[in-house]
Image (tube, rainbow, N blue to C red):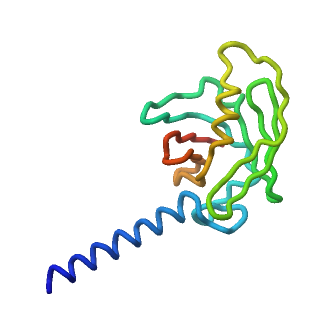
Amino acid sequence: MKKVIYYLLIVGVVALLAYLGFRIIGNNDEAGSVGGSESIQNVNWQWVSLVDEGTPFDVPNPADYTITFNSDGTLTGKADCNTFEGTYSQTNDFFITIGSSTMAFCGEASLDTMYLSLLGSVVAGGPDGSGGLALETAGGAQRMTFGK
């Protein structure tokens, strides 16, 4: 009988932690906040780092890679020498759709194409707990972090 009680207790704790973790990283129906009272809106977020399948990478010029989430569900940003706009949704996960972008050649070392591709692959995101923003692709394969 004790084993059954311990088993049910463990299952309950795991279910609670999974629920809370899911709410924090991306399933919050409130427009303007993912995972708590911190809002991601109306902040000019700068891309500072990427963890790509466990390998960390610091973005050399964070101010060249920005994104701002507006309260009406639209977004704007900068991808090196290009600008872009689009939409985002926080209903049933977190999705970004890049609508239009300028397409100038920004140089061989530019991360503009990678940045826009990663943004279009985001499925989860929200405040990272330390004043920043984290966006993740499916399965957490890539995690982008942003600062203010």
Quadrant in which residue 105 is drawn:
top right
Residue 87 position within the rendered picture, expressed as x and y whole percent measured from the top left: 79, 50
Q: How many numbered discs, if any?
A: 0
Q: Residue at x 66, y 32 (%)?
A: 115
Q: Is residue 72 above or below residue 139?
A: below
Query: In screen coordinates, is 117 left or right of 85?
Result: left
Q: Residue at x 59, y 34 (%)?
A: 48
Q: Residue furthest bottom?
A: 1
Residue 145 position within the rendered picture, expressed as x and y whole percent measured from the top left: 57, 41
Query: In screen coordinates, is 55 left or right of 2?
Result: right
Q: Residue furthest top?
A: 108
> Which image quarter holds the C terminus?
top right
> Which image quarter holds the N terminus?
bottom left
Residue 113 position within the rendered picture, expressed as x and y whole percent measured from the top left: 69, 27
Query: In screen coordinates, is 18 left or right of 69?
Result: left
Q: Return the residue nearer the eye: 56 or 138.
A: 138
Quadrant in which residue 90 is drawn:
bottom right
Q: Return the residue nearer the eye: 16 or 59.
A: 16
Q: Is residue 116 above or below residue 44?
A: above
Q: Residue at x 68, y 20 (%)?
A: 110
Q: Residue at x 67, y 68 (%)?
A: 29
Q: Is residue 122 above or below residue 113?
A: below
